[in-house]
Amino acid sequence: MASQRYSDRPLFLIIALLSVFLQACIDNGREKIVSPPGYQLDKPQRFKMSENLLEISGIAFKNNEADTIYAVQDEDGRVFYFKPGDRKPAYTHFAKQGDYEDIGILHNRIIVLKSNGTLFTFPIEQIKQLKPSNVQQLKGILPKAEYEGLYVDNTTNKIYVLCKDCNIGNEGVLNGGYIIDATDENNLKQTGTFQIALPKLSKKSGVDEAFHPSALAKNPVNGLWYILSATNNLLLITDAQWRIKATYKLPHSRFTQPEGIAFDKEGNLYISNEGDEFENGNILKFTYNKPAVKK
């Protein structure tokens, strides 16, 4: 028996070395992930979603508190709420089936964006009801178009809504959106527009004439806008005036379909991805680490 055991050792060594070699080839062949300052996009904490959030299309926090994630699913009139990592999210049924794109929380009211620009709102304390009793359906605030993303700024009482397929403003502006004044929660008014200019982006950035944003959020640490494009698997970062500061390619192997984005109060970044026939939807958390100051 001993001689048989020792005679098998070279075979085991060959298999082990071959495995190491193959893994090295795989790692070398992977596209290098370039990350924004303070984040490591190649080192996420992954929260796998349940089947009823397969097509998770938007996420939000209340006051940037990370203890509870609020989410909507495309084609499903439900708002889900759960602790990070919870595989059995609770939900409330606020409307019939439709194309729901994003979610935000305005102080103590939940706001859901439908793709046609209709907004649904109800008090957050009613989220534990099977069906909220005070749902408002707000039509006509936004012009007719197709919309993709929503961000609620509780500091300024403004709501930013991304337009999927419309040019707003001067030549060179591919995408933009509308600003809603939410000073009076019961009387939302569209008061302006914002424009994302993309005049000088190279082809290697992944941006072309087909670029369409899918979600946006403001980073509470640096005040910059982070804008996702599921079409191009791209993350854009702009300043407060919507001028592009940087673009980052999001590898499809990790970001299957990035549709939602949010930050907690510590500046940690969360990106939600729709699932497919092979993989469940997920939320990826990227911990914020303050970049070292260059001397």
Image (spheres, grey):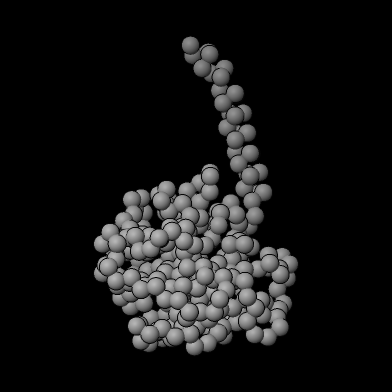
Tag count in the figure? 0
Residue name at image x 73 percent, y 67 percent: 203
Residue 270 in sight from this viewpoint? no
Q: Quadrant of residue 248?
A: bottom right
Kindly give the residue lying farthest to the top in the view shown: 1
- Give whichever of 150, 100 is nearer the camera: 100
Residue name at image x 59 percent, y 29 percent: 15
Residue 94 in sight from this viewpoint? yes
Q: Is residue 253 left or right of residue 128?
A: right
Residue name at image x 29 percent, y 71 percent: 134
Q: Is residue 213 left or right of residue 57?
A: right
Q: Is residue 53 left or right of residue 23?
A: left
For the C terminus, give its image quadrant. bottom right
The spot of residue 102 in percent (x, y) is 46, 67
- Give whichever of 93, 43 is nearer the camera: 93
Residue name at image x 42 percent, y 76 percent: 138
Image: 142 above or below 61: below
- Give whichever of 9, 254 is nearer the camera: 254
Image: 237 above or below 1: below
The spot of residue 125 in percent (x, y) is 26, 69
Image: 259 above or below 85: below
- Give whichever of 200, 102 is nearer the camera: 102
The spot of residue 75 in percent (x, y) is 47, 58
Q: Quadrant of residue 81?
A: bottom left
The spot of residue 222 in percent (x, y) is 48, 79
